[in-house]
Image: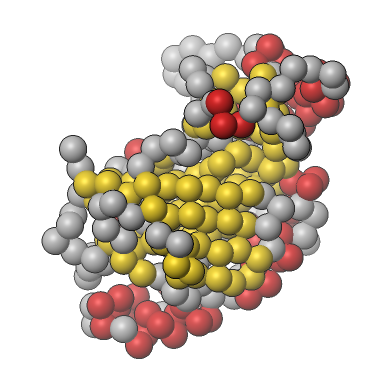
Amino acid sequence: MKICRFGENRFGVVTADGVVDVTEVFAALPASGYPFPRHDVMIAALPDLLPKLAKFVEGADVIPLDQIKLDLPVANPGKLVAAPVNYAKHLQEVRDQAELNHANEAHMRQIKDIGLFLKANSSLIGPGKAVEISRPDRRNDHEIELAVVIGKTGKNISAADALDYVAAYTIGLDMTVRGPEDRSFRKSLDTYSVLGPWLVTADEIPDPATLGFELTVNGETRQKAHTSDLVLSVPELIEYASSFYTLHPGDVIFTGTPEGVGQVHAGDTMHAQIDQIGELTVEVTGVA
């Protein structure tokens, strides 16, 4: 099932004909007061809601997709976990290009040597929002990634069990300012984490290693690869992340980007596509 958020905090199920407004079903979500939960309550409740959603959609009115404005599909992720240099060819291009590695040895090491990193939640935007280039004095790059949304709490999860902890998948853009600083610092600018266009529940993608994907800028292909080329697979990433962090419903794992990263400027249009998920178009602007 494809689940989106749109308009004034409404929920939808995406069908071949458009979007069914299922906000009524999500009214059953538990009310929260301060201190608020550290996880996304919608994602936590999703297993119980899916049968109700399937029944609600039958025979329901459909809104054409071009008549709604999609919003961030996960409203309250507790943390954004990201995987650096998780495609071998991208690691090689980082090693080969001084403007990517800045003579920083830490930028040129393998993922198993440097570990994962966290991005600020304040960097998140969804469809309909633009990436804002706030450091035009530096190179600002696009990085398309498969994003994994965790569905239940887990710690020290084995790779064999890892996919049982996945709620859904979506498209991620891990935007990056190049420079010598730590990755999390350069990748956490406002608007530099993009998710969308919707969530595709895990049952629709039983094997996340079977997905081709592509990113174009102004119609020119920049990145084109396949998730089978990941150094650490989705199950291995979940195992690795959960060996350090407790994962909670709504946490997002950016799985890494392939070769072909490149600069974007205000006025550019990025178009990302991942098999079995969909397409995402994002404008690039300067800071107002």
Can residue 135 be spotted in the picture?
A: yes
Tell me which colouring the rendered structure shows. Answer: secondary structure
**Residue 47, horizontal then vertical, whole percent:** 77, 31
Residue at the bottom extreme of this rendering: 96
Which residue is painted at 62% across and 57% down in the image?
274
**Residue 172, horizontal then vertical, whole percent:** 51, 52
Query: Where 130 sits versus 185, above or below?
Result: above
Foreground of the two, 62 or 214: 62
Query: Where 201 sits versus 105, above or below?
Result: above
Which residue is painted at 44% across and 15% down in the image?
34
Q: How many marks?
A: 0
Assign the C terminus to one quadrant of the image: top left
Q: Is residue 236 left or right of residue 15?
A: left
Can residue 38 be spotted in the picture?
A: no
**Residue 56, horizontal then vertical, whole percent:** 80, 18
* Quarter location, residue 59: top right
Assign the N terminus to one quadrant of the image: top right
Which residue is painted at 68% across and 12% down in the image?
24
Foreground of the two, 158 or 44: 44
Q: Is residue 54 left or right of residue 107?
A: right
**Residue 83, horizontal then vertical, whole percent:** 49, 63
Query: Where 30 sits versus 41, above or below?
Result: above
